[in-house]
Image (cartoon, rainbow, N blue to C red):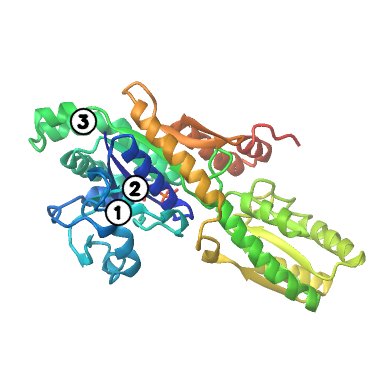
Amino acid sequence: MKLAILTSGGDSAGMNAVVRAVVKAGILKGCETWVVREGYEGLVRGNTEAAPKSEPSKTSQNLPANYRNTNINLIQNLRFGDGDLLKDGTGDFIGGRTIKGRYIVRVGFDDVRGWFAEGGTLIGTARSKTFRTREGRLAAAYNLVKEGIDALVVCGGDGSLTGADVFRAEWPELITALHAEGRISKEQAEAHSHLKIVGLVGSIDNDMSMTDLTIGAPTALHRICEAIDNINSTAASHSRAFVLEVMGRHCGWLALLAGVSGGADFIFIPERPPPHDTWEDEMCACIHRHREIGKRKTLVIIAEGAIDSNLNPIHADYVKDVLTDRLGLDTRVTTLGHTQRGGRPVAYDRVLPTLQGVEAVEALLESTPDTPSYMIGVQENKIIRVPLMEAVAMTRAVATAIEAKDFDKAMSLRDPEFKE
Ligand code: ADP
């Protein structure tokens, strides 16, 4: 099996650990391993230049042939290179030089050494408009067939996994079209009649249904906790109130768990919107009570997608004004922004991607035209496979339920065991 991996959509800690695990597990199981740079965009652009010949790095010379760094030393160049790859997204690093026109790059064991500890995604991620079109996906299919790749691992959020499912469903038709246009031979069309594809969820928001935890969410939560610890000391010293806005898009997981682990007085999450006409009274009464029993600091956490029961957004600045005007508190707003995404992955964001990466390779090896595309998840601490499209559909249903103000349904879609 020739196997390629790409990271797509928003970056998250642990994506590099996924790439490392998939490459290493793939090689150990006899596959040839490739990375696609810049997400689906790299798949669409493909390789317009031949792979330059290069020597294996010194450290890999004693390894068996397919363990070796075959034509690049990606990590070293990304760490110490001149940065062209990241600047214009069109380069390809070979032995310290930038080679234009290569997005699908063969990698060996050596290339991904130590990647579990790196933040973000070293192979790059992007949002690709072209891949949303049939034309773009036709180019992507051609580029994979050209390199002989027959299996794809996609690590990204629900958008990226939707793209993966669309690609797989369309694959037979794309292959027929490429053959009819004379771009691929009959033998190539036969050998590539089926695309094996599997999804891994990389998202800091923990917003995917049918899995308990997404890759990157534990690190983001940890970053928020560190920020709360820092804020708490200054808040207590000055007896201040802080309104902290955290990421999460339409999901309140980060806000809720940060509130539990950081001792918040009040938390706003999209799945449980407070009554639009009484939330200010409720919040002020709660915080007043906490102050009455001697609390010197106040912490209110707002998920970025927080809304009231009429679906009006609740903004941090507005909450600050309420606390200042009604309770006379010296209140500050802190928006954590991108600091939540970055930095080294915490231990669990190395363990989870490693276990899931190995499972992804196994799922690909067992894949047949009759098996669905799987998403690798984790439920009750066990690594599991679930049909990718079911997980995506259930995730989308949460947003629909919120829009329809059916908040109980939204909660039960997030957590089937949810009870009021
Ligand atoms: P995330 O994966 O973090 O949710 P996006 O929603 O931006 O991020 O999706 C990432 C990429 O996945 C998009 O830029 C696009 O290339 C691809 N994609 C998303 N939805 C589709 C779709 N319905 N069909 C084809 N490609 C898609």
Q: To which residue does mark 3 refer?
A: 192
Decide which of 375, 74 is in the foreground and name it.
Answer: 74
Query: Which of the 4 image quarters holds residue 82?
Result: bottom left
Q: Is mark 3 within 8 Å of ligand 1?
A: no
Q: Label 1 sits on what residue type?
A: Arg
**Is residue 391 something that shows in the picture?**
yes
Where does the C terminus fall, quadrant-wise? top right
Mark 1, Cα crowd under 10 Å, few <14 / some 14-19 / many 20+, is many
Gap between marks 2 and 1 measured at Cα: 7 Å
SS of the residue under disc 1: loop
SS of the residue under disc 2: strand
Decide which of 130, 231 is in the foreground and name it.
Answer: 231
Q: Position of residue 363 (x, y in %)?
A: 39, 30
Closer to the chain start, of discs 2 and 1, is 2
Gap between marks 3 and 1 measured at Cα: 22 Å
Q: Is residue 116 left or right of residue 29?
A: right
Q: Is residue 75 left or right of residue 330?
A: left
Q: To which residue does mark 1 refer?
A: 37
Q: Is residue 336 left or right of residue 126?
A: right
Q: Are marks 2 and 1 in contact (CB under 8 Å)?
A: yes
Decide which of 100, 304 is in the foreground and name it.
Answer: 100
Q: Label 2 sits on what residue type?
A: Leu
Badge number at residue 6: 2
Closer to the chain start, of discs 3 and 1, is 1
Where does the N terminus fall, quadrant-wise? top left
Q: Position of residue 48 (x, y in %)?
A: 14, 53
Q: Residue furthest top?
A: 370
